[in-house]
Amino acid sequence: MASTADHRPAADASSPAPLDKRLITSWSLWSWGNATVSAVMVTFVFGTYIASEAFGPDERGTQYLTTANAIAGLIVAVTAPIIGQRADRAGKRRLWLIINTAIIVALVAACFFVRPEEGFLLLGVTLMASMTLFDEFANLNYNAMIVDITDHSRMGRVSGIGWGAGYLGGIVLLMLVYLGLITGDPPHVFGIGEDDAMNIRVVALVAAAWFLLWALPLLLTRQKTADQDTVPAERISVVESYRRLFGTLIGLWKEDRNTFWFLLASAVYRDGLSAVFTYGAILGTTLYGINPADVIIFGIAGNLVAALGAFIGGWLDDRIGPRKVIAGCLIGLLGSSLALLMLTEERVIGAAADPLLTITPTAAFWVLGLFLCLFVGPAQASSRGFLGRLAPPEKAGELFGLYATAGRSVSFLTPALISLMLLFLDSNMAIVVAIIVTLLFGLGLLVLVRNPTEPAKMRDWSQKS
């Protein structure tokens, strides 16, 4: 049986072997194309379309979509580690990436058939939630591949490059569909009108083709992955897979508290990071006076800044360690959020009669909101790099599955805090306060974590006598 060292760069070699730049480029291009799901379909275009009044009164579209996404999130939380574990065991991590990518492309393209009528609402939310579900499964295997393309000493920069590519891909695609299909008077640049929401539905076809085009270089590569060196010793049932999963969790608690605490801490602060993008547009328009028409412009600027942050953070990660990068980003996010909290009303610096500077809420949001985006990118990229350093190559899929499940298991945290804060605050300031509390809690848990120095001890304690 071949050793994983045959194709994975050595972690402690005094002069590390050159990285396969072609493979890293292909891996990053998949992320560039995958921005289709988050930037275009979920956040700025198709999710907004489903939530519109075209699909029924009383915000019915939003209600159906959030319910469907909650169901998809529950499925991910329950199944992600098992899917990763079984992909590792079968040595088919890349095969499942191919399958899940193909399913996502098909689901995105099928959104073209969602016409702006109430009768199509169920089809729309089913396609959107299914897309989110399979995107989680695809990213599980995609993230696990980081152990195949770089060594520990350069994992930060590679993760940063991949994450930054995703942000940049989102910008380019968002500008393409915005300028070509959404803004201006119909027919738009591509000659497509707005009757029957045809211009929005065509966005789905463009987005599907975009993802397929940029995913192909990685999907067609012949590079072997670490799990392919693991010959399955046995075929096990799904029930046995869950038994071994719980055994692994017990093993982490007993033998590897660092990995255990990182999974928990990252789950908490990543919920806060997600909230920055999830609620950013709501905050900008309702609390800080951003024109709704400018939200997509802010989204483009925010993604550009987040990409820059991911690139810089990846470079720092390899020099000072991922824990310091993550902690620094969380502190920066907390500082920016606190400043935003104090600038919901116009502030004057200097004498009232002769002010040196007048800061409006809108200007504050443009500056501090972009600072938030700057810190989100490297925090996400370094978290993946942190876990990549912990992941045993033959069990990377299972560990990244646990990472996904941990995140889903606390994804209620910020929304629940917002609901609680609204009992005491009569405005969307509750969102800012909830994000601050979540990030502060995550930073506190990160104190229990130290930089990874060895692979996670993923021994199955359920097999011990």
Image (tube, grey):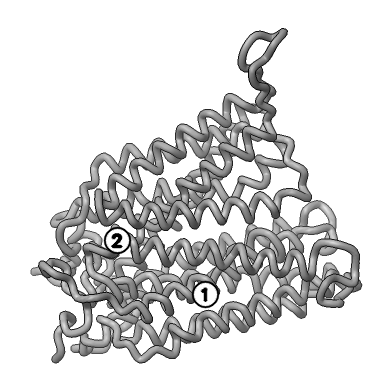
Nearest to the eye among marks 1 and 2: give it. 2
Residue 299 vertical placement versus 419 (above, below): below
Q: State the SS at label 2.
A: helix
> Pointer 1: residues within 10 angstroms few (<14), some, or many (20+)?
many
Which of the two residues, 422 or 149, is positioned nearer the viewer here?
A: 149
> Quick check: 271 left or right of 235?
right
| Mark positioned earlier in the residue sequence (1 or 2) | 1
Please tell me whether residue 161 is drawn above or below residue 285 in the rendered image: below
Considering only vertical position in the picture, is 274 above or below 393?
above
**Residue 386 or 48: which is nearer the viewer?**
386
**Residue type beneath disc 1:** Phe
Please name the residue shown 59% across and 81% down the image.
Answer: 105
Disc 2: CA contacts within 10 A as few (<14), some (14-19) or many (>=20): many
Question: Residue at the location (32% across, 77% down)?
Answer: 239
Residue furthest to the left in view is 465
Give percent across and percent down for residue 324: 29, 45
Asked whether residue 301 is in view, the answer is yes
Please say if 362 is above or below 201: above
Q: Which residue is mark 1?
A: 134
In x, y percent, where is residue 352?
Answer: 69, 9
- Identify the residue shown where x is 58% and y is 78%: 211
Q: Quadrant of residue 218?
A: bottom left
Tag 1's secondary structure?
Answer: helix
**Can you give x and y, in whole percent of width and height, for residue 248 in the image?**
22, 65
Q: What residue is at 61 percent from the left and 29 percent from the top? A: 423
Marks 1/2: CA distance?
21 Å
- Name the amino acid type tagged 2: Leu
Foreground of the two, 433 or 129:
433
Mark 2 lies on residue: 387
Left or right side of 116 for 392: left
